Amino acid sequence: MAKQMDWHTKMTRALRVATDTARKAGKILVEELAGLKPEEIDEKGVNDYVTKVDRKSEDFIRAAIAKEFPGDDVIGEESGGPDGSVESLWVVDPLDGTHNYVHRLPHFSVSIAMMFNGRVEIGVIFDPIRNEMFACKRDEGVWLNDTPISVSSCGDMGRALVGTGLPARYRRDSGPFVAQLGRVIPVVASIRRSGSAALDLAYVACGRLDGFWETILSPWDMAAGGLLVETAGGVISDPSGNPWNLKSVGIVAGNPATHPALLKLLAG
């Protein structure tokens, strides 16, 4: 019983730390947005950008986690980290939607997940522009600003609104994505591409989107959002239909009806 109580206490505390930290990191993003200068934007790779704000946000999140959970490890988009084999691991995207951010398009987020023995237990995604906090604790609930949420009840792909994302290197690797898009577009009601995979997954969790897929993503793009979807009654997998894990390179998410239908379309 004591061990169970310790576990419950740690997860409750982890959720509090994740939400508080995401909210404060989001405030940093908003405060820095207007003053961002071109010379403060670097290109990590082809069509892959990072700003001083990404780094400032991640440094803040890492420091907050280290203060509250000094024995835990962190993997983040800008600073890397362990491969997921450690017992307690935080998976952090300090600014999901950097392309939107550098163009001052107000759609981006902070994503924080906490994993234990390879399984995501806590997931938080914060949209600082809309002041929307998506948060979940496995097996206990999922909320948008303290209101319980669930995936949509849409069972007809002809009525489904589906989100997707372009591969980061779409100029070179667009072929498979374009083929998938060509199979999905004629079947669904409409497609959306927002530029923040974390928020797309949060939108699946709350029913704003009926499904989402992206074939090339990093773990920090998916960890928190995937748990949100599952906890809200949805289904996630990798693009081949296998169970999602930290080493998956993409994700397919939806409600129990749209997920298998979307997988089938993507497979061709």
Image (spheres, helix red, strand yellow):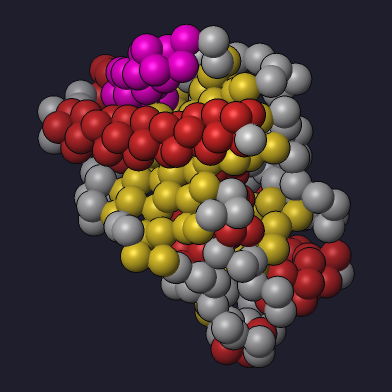
Q: Nearer the viewer, residue 241 or 162?
A: 241
* Tally of marks: 0
Is residue 221 rendered magenta in the image? no
Q: Is residue 210 above or below residue 93?
A: below
Is residue 53 rendered magenta in the image? yes
Instruction: Point out residue 86 in the picture as x, y percentages from the top left corner.
Output: 70, 17
Q: Nearer the viewer, residue 207 or 123?
A: 123
Q: Is residue 141 above or below residue 127?
A: below
Q: Quadrant of the N terminus?
A: top right
The residue sitting at 69% across, 51% down in the picture is: 251
Name the side, left or right, on which 71 lies relative to 195.
right
Instruction: Point out residue 260 in the picture as x, y percentages from the top left corner.
Output: 78, 72
Magenta stretch prevailing secondary structure: helix
Name the side, left or right, on which 143 lies relative to 114.
left
The residue sitting at 41% across, 66% down in the picture is: 148
Query: Seen from this angle, which residue lies furthest front?
Result: 1
Q: Is residue 97 above or below residue 95?
A: below
Instruction: Point out residue 46 in the picture as x, y percentages from the top left corner.
Output: 55, 29
Q: Quadrant of the C terminus?
A: bottom right
Q: Is residue 159 above or below residue 91?
A: below
Name the side, left or right, on which 89 lies relative to 197.
right
Instruction: Point out residue 12 in the picture as x, y percentages from the top left corner.
Output: 45, 38
Residue 180: in sight, yes or no? yes
Residue 45: in sight, yes or no? no
The residue sitting at 20% across, 24% down in the picture is: 37
The residue sitting at 74% across, 40% down in the picture is: 245
Name the side, left or right, on which 196 lies relative to 175.
left
| Magenta span of residues | 50-70
